[in-house]
């Protein structure tokens, strides 16, 4: 499935899905889409920094994989949003932000059906 199709399907999952971004393992955004209802909370620079830090953290998780097992997803829950980070293949990461009240497991389960 193509990157754009994945993002569009996730955005259609619920009005609570705010932004879908796919980046490489260095945190460089390859594709990003957002709901038309969304007011961006971070500047472009802050978004880039967030992606970079999440990609760095994912690389550390990969180093621990032999002992802990493969990381399935990471959830960061803030006061205003939730951010789910998941692998998208072996060389990319998928970042999905939702409203803070949304059940993030719905997004996780939906992404798992794409494989």
Image (cartoon, rainbow, N blue to C red):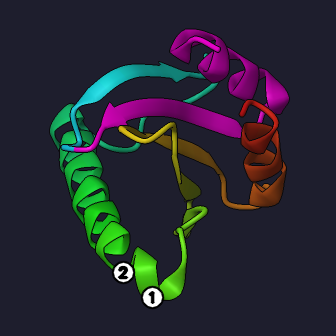
Q: Residue at x 57, y 29 (%)?
A: 38
Q: Is residue 58 above or below residue 98?
A: below
Mark count: 2
Which quadrant holds the C terminus?
Answer: top right
**How far from the left and from the top, in percent, is residue 98?**
65, 47
Judge whether residue 6 is colored magenta.
Answer: yes
Q: What element carries label 1?
A: helix
Magenta extent: 1-25
Q: Mark 1 points at which residue?
A: 67
Residue 58 falls in image quadrant: bottom left
For residue 39, say whether it is visible. Answer: no
Q: Is residue 12 left or right of residue 87?
A: right
Q: Residue at x 69, y 37 (%)?
A: 17
**How far from the left and from the top, in percent, is residue 60?**
27, 72
Q: In this view, does 48 lie to the left or right of 33?
A: left
Q: Which of 43 and 93 is in front in this view?
A: 93
Q: In this view, does 3 lie above or below 23?
A: above
Mark 1: few/some/many CA within 10 Å (<14, 14-19, 20+):
few
Q: Nearer the viewer, residue 17 or 113?
A: 113
Q: Mark 2 points at which residue?
A: 64
Mark 2: few/some/many CA within 10 Å (<14, 14-19, 20+):
few
Which quadrant holds the N terminus?
Answer: top right
Q: Which of 68 and 77 is in front in this view?
A: 68
Q: CB of mark 2 within 8 Å of CB of mark 1? A: yes
């Amino acid at each position: 499935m193509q990157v754009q199709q994945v993002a569009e399907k996730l955005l259609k999952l619920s009005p609570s899905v705010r932004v879908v971004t796919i980046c490489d393992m260095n945190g460089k955004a390859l594709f990003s889409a957002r709901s038309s209802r969304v007011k961006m909370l971070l500047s472009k620079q802050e978004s880039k920094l967030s992606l970079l830090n999440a990609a760095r953290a994912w690389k550390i998780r990969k180093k621990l994989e032999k002992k802990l097992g493969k990381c399935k997803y990471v959830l960061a829950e803030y006061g205003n949003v939730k951010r789910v980070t998941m692998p998208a293949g072996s060389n990319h990461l998928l970042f999905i932000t939702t409203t803070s009240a949304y059940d993030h497991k719905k997004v996780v389960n939906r992404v798992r059906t794409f494989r």
